[in-house]
Amino acid sequence: MKNIRNFSIIAHIDHGKSTLADRLIQLCGGVTDRKFQDQLLDNMDIERERGITIKSQTIYLPYRAADGKEYILNLVDTPGHVDFSYEVSRALAACEGALLLVDAAQGIEAQTLANLYLAMENDLEIIPVINKIDLPAAEPEKVAIEIEEDLGLEAEHIQQSSAKTGQGVEDLLEAVVRFLPPPQGDADAPLQAMIFDAQYDSFRGTIISCRLFNGRVRPGDQITFLSSGVTHKVDEVGHYHLTKEPARELTAGEVGYIIAGIKNVADARVGDTITLKDNPCTESLPGYQPAKQVVFSSIYPVSTEDYDDLAAAMEKLTLNDASLTFQKDSSTALGFGFRCGFLGLLHLEVVQQRLEREFDLSLILTVPSVNYHVFLTDGTMLEVDNPSYYPDPGSIQRVEEPFIKATIMIPEKYMGVVMNLCMERRGVNSNHHYPMPGRIEYTCELPLSEVIYDFYDRLKSLTQGYGSFDYELLDYRPADLVKMDLLVNGERMDALSQLVHRSSARARGLSACEKLKEEIPRHMFKIAIQAAVGSNIVARTTVAAMRKDVLAKCYGGDVSRKRKLLEKQKAGKKKMKTVGNVEIPQSAFLAVLKSDES
């Protein structure tokens, strides 16, 4: 066990985690040059398209150190985006150490700090690494001072590398072997293994990723899940190379997978403890804190016949993405679906794309909202995350909305535009300081509902991609909220209803109406699109009718004949408007979700 090292790579988004993981795998001989491709551990199409890591991935690397000893390195590559921080926390629980990557050109950013605190909470040994030292704008000496002063990490442990060129990566592997501690545990004690991830295979059932803290497990063993008490027989155990490689056994300190023919998705829950049926452990491992969902949206199948397929897909996806929650929901316009909780807007987008691609479903999403506290005049308090359940305004005493503390790291020259953006979004108690010359850390308290809409897109546009953003939930504060409905041809579309602040109702209504106007095709009659707060119309636009030229056959004659034909057409259109249905395409629902172009 003393020759095993379990470690993770953590950093802010786009600081080079996946590239460094590629170099480490190549150096340890984990992949041949013929099979190598960039972002080796990112095996989802969405990850490759966007250039981001969404899922933590584990790989088993044998390494011969300078001292001649053979070491086993279990490397976990983690996401960097704030929406996937729960994925990072789960990966860190399976490790003893972490490499904290800092970009040599950009320095410490918001998510660098957040991930460092996560690693400290897990009592991990941390090796700071200054990456991208090959860049022309790299300032490794300046970043080293920043790491020492701001993060309080020891300067002599700082490693410098360029994941792109491979410079310094060999020294980094030696530092992992030298500075990171081996795992603790007893291979002869009763089995104690924690599930930190799982995925569903249609042929082999649920494949469990676990870290063994004590004991050993072999094919043929009877294992028990402590939380549910369910027992299964182990078919296969093994390690994660680039493909799954079966092994004779997994022992304490190792990270690997277990296949036990688990067909019921609910049996294997992330954070649960696995033990042997014949020789069980006395207590379960601590597991994980449940994730706090901050954005809520309803997902409906385009065809109501796909509801059962969607239900099965949601079960399988929550197995692989433990931060997603869902419950049954229904809508008069869209039928049956699920009300889902997400960790952020990017998380929502990724879940939607995974459901469409991996499970071949066509979906409609409702406008995202947050969890509001609604206090009624009779003294009761409701938690409302769905506009459909917003009570009658006459029975409401007050409404409270969640506030966050936003931390934004920006170059000095963008301070003005970022302050204006935060003030537009009802920001209060703003503050700033200079962690290093030329860079500002700006903090501001903002309503969460203003952030989930298009805040991150606007911030990136205004700062030309240099702004980084992280947030933590603060508390609930009083708010002047109203429910805004969208009416198409006089019919209320409950899937497009939103809870908005009274001051931004008109602007948000106009934006939604304009987007719907672009998406709804023209019919033979005029279509009024309106945004209404209660009985007051706050915004309106009209989709013009397709007009047939009924006067084409009148090449002469009295004007009264033309007028008669026009009146007849007008009466026909009026009748059609009362009985005709407006076809609203799926793209119209998605258009309302998208932010305005900045």
Image (cartoon, grey):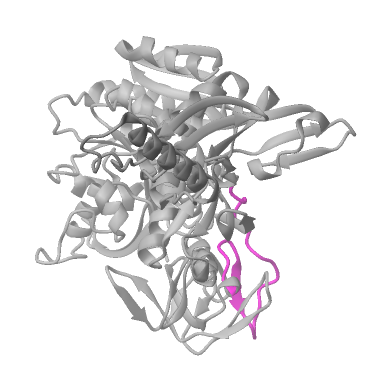
Q: Is residue 536 above or below residue 20?
A: above
Say which of 563 and 258 sits in front: 563
- Residue 364 rendering spot, x and y as whole percentages: 47, 53
Q: Main secondary structure of the magenta part?
A: loop
Look at 25% across and 39% down and name the residue there.
Answer: 554
Say which of 340 and 140 sits in front: 340
Tell whether position 288 is magenta. Answer: yes
Quarter of the figure with residue 265: bottom right
Q: Is residue 518 visible?
A: yes
8 sits to left or right of 329: left
Say which of 187 and 20 sits in front: 20
| Residue situated furthest left in the rendering | 34
Q: Which residues are magenta?
A: 267-291
456 sits to left or right of 535: left
382 sits to left or right of 173: right
Q: Is residue 498 above or below residue 364?
A: above
- Residue 43 rendering spot, x and y as whole percentages: 29, 61
Say which of 480 and 28 sits in front: 480
- Residue 97 rendering spot, x and y as whole percentages: 42, 49
